[in-house]
Amino acid sequence: MSPCFRRVLRLFAATALLSPLTSTAAAASYAPQAAVIAPRAASSLMLDVTAVGGRYVAVGERGQILGSADGKTWTQVPVPVRAALTAVSFADARNGWAVGHDAVILNTRDGGASWGLQHFEPALEKPLLDVVFVDARRGFAVGAFGLFLRTVDGGDTWTPLHTPAVDDDELNLYAIVRLGNDDLLIVGEQGRLLLSTDAGTSWSKLASPLESTLFGASAFGTSGALICGLRGEAWVSDAVRIGRWRSIDTGTRHTLHACVAIGNDRAFLVGAEGTVLLADPVRRSGRRVKSPAAGVWSAVAVGAAGPVLAGERGLHAIRTVPGR
């Protein structure tokens, strides 16, 4: 495993995603500092990207948040923290949230032009790894060792969510997504699958098609999901409540960090060693797409200007996809 890959994996593997402070006492007195505006931020380590309102918003190391209209030219915006940001999600075109190290949660109400701090708890020594909102007021954030927070007031207050489906093992929770039927799905360590069919009020464990770690998930169709993780594993289900997961032949053993389904017959999956795959979830097959850069990809978003990748080498747009 290369040093660069280990560096990126540390940002995904929650056992190493801890505050740089050496003690809880020190962490308790740690005050947030604003992110530095960096000329080459778009070329630095970026951990997530999303498409919203005809634009792209990306987050990454040192509290960096960038926006773009075309996926090629990026502008960094002021952010009140320097903690690494691991995920970004929007409830609508204006209301969005970003999460990361130090259990930080940021919020924007203007589509990503400005961000405010809602939650900051470095003494917890657990990073948040993903966030999703049911609407502009009800949201959930998940992370290391079963860290699970929720809000019912748009993020003004965040409280721990305790449920037997999570509390009994404290496994790392890597992704949470809203499905087409409004169910919520969480994927995580050891193939963990958690489902809520009542907007997050209650949660249950689902039978998983594998026992290895799952890093990414995407809504698929009206009630299904696409999931991916270690060793090139990718699975699809038309109805998550029922199960019946079907394996996708990805043609790779490289770890897949993220996936996004577009319609019913196309999906992008990205991961280690510059892996970029274009898959057909219905035919359960995938093929490699030329990567715009070497290194590890951590996320992919598909917007009006096409697919955009986020990863070790920054942000890159895929302008053409052969065969499409």
Image: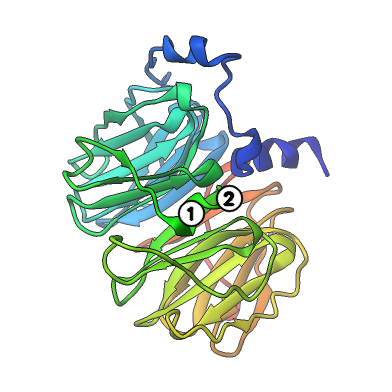
Name the residue that disc number 2 marks: 171
Name the residue that disc number 1 marks: 166
Query: Would residue 233 appear left or right of 317 to someone viewing this image?
Result: right
Instruction: Please report contact status of discs 2 and 1: CB closer than 8 Å, yes or no.
Output: yes
Q: Quadrant of residue 115?
A: top left
Secondary element under disc 1, as helix, strand or loop, is: helix
Which residue of the protein is positioned furthest toward the right in this rendering?
A: 1
Q: Nearer the viewer, residue 182 or 316?
A: 182
Give the mark nearest the N terminus, 2 or 1: 1
Q: Quadrant of residue 75?
A: top left
Q: Eyeballing the image, is 225 above or below 41?
A: below
Quadrant in which the N terminus appears: top right
**Numbered label tally:** 2
Q: Residue at x 58, y 45 (%)?
A: 311
Q: Eyeballing the image, is 37 above or below 185?
A: above
Q: Residue at x 43, y 18 (%)?
A: 36
Q: Eyeballing the image, is 256 above or below 324?
A: above
Q: Nearer the viewer, residue 5 or 36?
A: 5
